[in-house]
């Protein structure tokens, strides 16, 4: 009787190191019986019940062992690895350190309501602030208000809580200790651990180096993370019975990001001597933070970064270093891409500059006179729309027969356009449109420069961060600046890399879905379960996409209609970057086809309803 693996069991195995199933072993045992005893005796064994019993029991045991062997073999290569600890061990052998989490950070401006009068107020590093939803932020520097001083003063804080663990050395080489008191849902923040051996601080290294120095390594990727010491050759050994004291920041990563002015209270009162003080605190939205590196990311980045040998010569080198980059303050690069731009459309920074020029260079609209609306005439600051062109713009200056308009979108205004003031209702028919064409002239010039013989000197590296859901978002300026310094220090002398925000080439896509449900799925509980599943599969399809990966509606139909309970569906791309898709953006099938330097991500959560 044949033994079959379940689909779940089959899915757990990726390698084929042994790669043999029950039927294969039965056949091999039968072949061996014939070889060993001859056809007649082997036939007697095979035909007997007891013979079949022995053959099938051996085949079952061997096929089970083969499955377990393949399962173990999976975790010996990056190609198939599933366990985080195994992925980290392999990456470490390649000389690659998987990224840790990075805490969201804010810059706080603090002003005292009245000054200290007897002694100065000192805010020590590590002072705790209370954020929304049970979050805590801690200050990263000491802040002092002298007597009579109210500020304002600006300082930084990061999300998380400081945790201390204490161990005792046994004096053996290669000691490691598990860091086991990390709160649920949090991870150790990149570069935050500080370790003291008998009150002497040792230095953290990404990987232990072959020097007899006081060093340690934190292996962030293990569950739980490990504090690793040397063997006396690569790093000193802590003396026997020495006290090892480690502190670190445990962060929620992107889940700890906050909006502006939501972290405005200290956990403990502000006391200067015997005086209790009050203060106002303001801050912008936090940096997004980042989670510790996923196994799929390690699988890709570890070999690519190792191949670069810490220098950037080819585009492949640049892509590897960009996508593995992490800054301990501004987070990790979620996705990035290096290009040698040949035209303006390939250059994210050039497109950004041209967009700014278009927004501030006015277009002159000439008309024969305006007709006031219910709320007056045209006015500076009001928006106008064209009935023929569909263009919109904002008035910056006007006369009795002209309008100067900036931020023109949805196409240029044209002669004979009937323009309407969206605030006052005033109207006028255009007789002429005079566009100075500054942006277009610069575009032509830039195209000529980029297409010249000097083609390999400038590389554009566009980068994006990710929010708590995994959507690609604009990268913090600090992350781009930090990456710029890092990459150019490794680029060959004839290349200069310009790091830019990749949001200009980002399409945030929102979907509207209508589904027809089968019999048995029309009660409220079943309906909501199907809706939730549809939303989940579509969100997954729109997250973690790569550059140049177009969005095909047919792929989405296949995902949705594979959900149990869905008979058929109707899917549309309802918004791109918050607005309805402009004419011509989608092809005739409703697909969003993009260029190789563009990328798609999830916009608003899909809206699902029943047909």
Image (cartoon, rainbow, N blue to C red):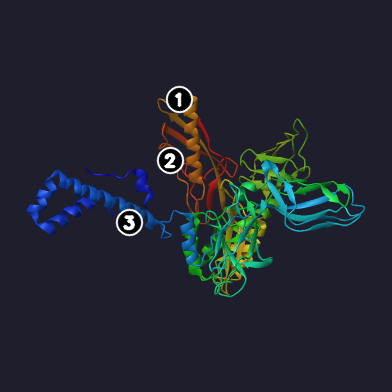
Q: Compared to 570, does 190 lie above or below?
A: below
Secondary structure under the numbered disc 2 in the rendered image: helix
Farthest left residue in view: 40
Disc 3 to disc 2, C-alpha distance? 29 Å
Q: Residue at x 40, y 25 (%)?
A: 519
Between marks 3 and 1 in the image, the one whose residue lies nearer the viewer: 3
Q: Is residue 238 above or below residue 553?
A: below
Judging by the rendered image, the residue that carries numbered circle 3 is: 16
> Picture coordinates of residue 121 (x, y %)?
85, 54
Element marked by disc 1: loop
Question: In front of the other: label 3 or label 2?
Answer: 3
Question: Marks 1 and 2, Cα distance to the nearest angstrom?
Answer: 20 Å
Q: Which residue is outermost to the front? A: 241
Q: Secondary structure at mark 3?
A: loop
Please state if 51 lies on the left or on the right of 221 as rendered.
left
- Residue 414, quarter of picture: top right
Q: Is residue 448 visible?
A: no
The residue indicated by pointer 2 is 559
How far is the residue under mark 3 from the one under mark 1? 44 Å
**Residue 284 % position (x, y):** 73, 49
N-terminal label among 1 and 2? 1
- Residue 399 in the image, given as x and y percentages of width and height: 78, 44
């Amino acid at each position: 009787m044949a033994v079959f693996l379940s689909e779940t069991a089959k899915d757990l195995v990726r390698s084929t190191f042994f790669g043999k199933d029950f039927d294969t072993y039965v056949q091999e045992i039968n072949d061996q019986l014939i070889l060993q005893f001859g056809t007649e005796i082997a036939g007697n064994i095979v035909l007997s019940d007891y013979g079949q019993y022995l053959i099938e029991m051996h085949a079952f045991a061997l096929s089970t062992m083969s499955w377990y062997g393949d399962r173990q073999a999976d975790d010996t290569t990056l190609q198939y690895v599933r366990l985080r600890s195994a992925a980290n061990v392999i990456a470490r052998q390649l000389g690659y350190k998987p990224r840790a989490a990075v805490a969201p950070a804010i810059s706080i401006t603090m002003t005292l309501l009245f000054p200290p009068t007897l002694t100065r107020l000192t805010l020590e590093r590590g002072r705790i602030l209370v954020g929304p939803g049970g979050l805590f932020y801690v200050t990263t520097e000491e802040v002092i208000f002298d007597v009579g001083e109210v500020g304002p003063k600006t300082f930084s804080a990061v999300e998380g809580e400081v945790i201390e663990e204490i161990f005792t050395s046994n004096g053996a080489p290669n000691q490691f200790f598990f860091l086991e008191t990390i709160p649920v849902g949090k991870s150790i923040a990149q570069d935050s651990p500080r370790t003291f051996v008998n009150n002497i601080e040792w230095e953290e290294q990404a990987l232990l180096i072959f020097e007899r120095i006081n060093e340690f390594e934190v292996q962030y990727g293990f569950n739980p993370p490990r504090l690793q010491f040397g063997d006396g050759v690569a790093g000193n050994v802590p003396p026997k019975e020495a006290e090892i004291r480690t502190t670190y920041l445990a962060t929620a990563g992107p889940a700890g990001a906050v909006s502006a002015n939501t972290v405005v209270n200290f956990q403990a009162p502000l006391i200067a001597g015997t005086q209790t003080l009050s203060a106002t605190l303001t801050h912008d939205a936090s940096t997004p933070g980042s989670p510790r590196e996923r196994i799929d990311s390690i699988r890709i980045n570890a070999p690519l970064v190792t191949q670069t040998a810490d220098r950037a010569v080819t585009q492949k080198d640049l892509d590897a270093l960009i996508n593995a980059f992490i800054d301990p303050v501004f987070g990790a690069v979620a996705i990035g891409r290096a290009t040698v731009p040949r035209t303006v459309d390939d250059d994210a920074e050039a497109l950004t500059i041209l967009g700014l020029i278009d927004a501030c260079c006015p277009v002159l609209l000439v008309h024969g006179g305006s007709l006031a609306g219910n709320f007056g005439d045209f006015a500076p600051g009001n928006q106008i729309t064209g009935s023929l062109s569909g263009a919109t713009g904002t008035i910056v200056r006007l006369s009795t027969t002209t309008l100067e308009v900036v931020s023109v979108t949805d196409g240029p205004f044209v002669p004979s356009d009937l323009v309407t003031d969206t605030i006052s209702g005033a109207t006028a028919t255009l007789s002429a449109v005079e566009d100075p064409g500054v942006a277009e002239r610069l575009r032509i010039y830039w195209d000529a420069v980029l297409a010249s013989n000097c083609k390999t000197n400038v590389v554009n590296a566009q980068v994006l961060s990710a929010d708590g859901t995994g959507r690609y978002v604009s990268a913090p300026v600090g992350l781009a600046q930090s990456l710029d310094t890092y990459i150019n220090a490794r680029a060959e002398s004839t290349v200069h890399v310009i790091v830019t925000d990749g949001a200009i080439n980002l399409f945030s896509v929102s979907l509207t879905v209508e589904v027809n449900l089968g019999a048995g799925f029309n009660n409220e509980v079943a309906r909501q379960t199907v809706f939730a599943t549809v939303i989940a599969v579509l969100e997954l399809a729109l997250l973690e996409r790569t550059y140049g990966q177009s969005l095909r509606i047919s792929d989405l139909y296949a995902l949705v209609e594979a959900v149990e309970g869905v008979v058929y569906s109707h899917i549309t791309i309802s918004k791109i970057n918050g607005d309805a898709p402009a004419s011509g953006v989608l092809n005739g099938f409703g697909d969003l086809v993009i260029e190789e330097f563009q990328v798609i991500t999830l916009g608003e959560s899909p809206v699902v309803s029943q047909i």
